[in-house]
Amino acid sequence: MEYMTIWSNGYRVRAALTVTIVAESEKAIQFEVADNPKIKLWFPRKALREVNGALDRHFQLAQWFTFNDFTRNVFDRYASHY
């Protein structure tokens, strides 16, 4: 199981959510939250930019992408904030 990170840039804070890929389709990717495997989130491929770093693989969320209430709560609860 390969862990990766989804980064979200906010106005004053950056959030990093550790996830694994569960499923992929032509238009979206489903991720499982590492800290709570019961939570699975779909993100459209258009909103994700994949970046292969020296240490790990991660995704950057597009600035135009907005969270619904559930996804915002997941990031608030399980993501690391910088």
Image (spheres, rainbow, N blue to C red):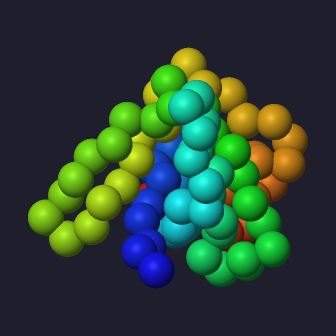
Residue occupying image coordinates x 75% and y 47%: 72
Viewer-nearest residue: 81 or 75: 75
Q: In this view, does 48 lie above or below 73?
A: above
Residue 38 at x, y = what percent? 81, 74
Q: Is residue 49 above or below residue 15?
A: above
Viewer-nearest residue: 24 or 37: 24
Residue occupying image coordinates x 46% and y 80%: 1
Viewer-nearest residue: 22 or 47: 22
Residue occupying image coordinates x 67% and y 56%: 75
Residue at the outermost right position: 69
Residue occupying image coordinates x 68% and y 28%: 66
Q: How many marks?
A: 0
Residue 25 at x, y = what percent? 59, 39
Q: Can residue 12 be seen in this view?
A: no
Image quarter (top left, top right, bottom left or bottom right) of the C terminus: bottom left
Q: Quadrant of residue 34?
A: bottom right
In the shown orientation, is residue 21 left or right of residue 66?
Answer: left
Residue 19 at x, y = what percent? 55, 66
Residue at the outermost left position: 54
Q: In this view, does 69 lie above or below 1?
A: above
Q: Is residue 69 visible?
A: yes
Q: In which quarter of the image is residue 40?
A: bottom right
Residue 21 at x, y = what percent? 54, 61
Viewer-nearest residue: 42 or 5: 42
Residue at the outermost front position: 26
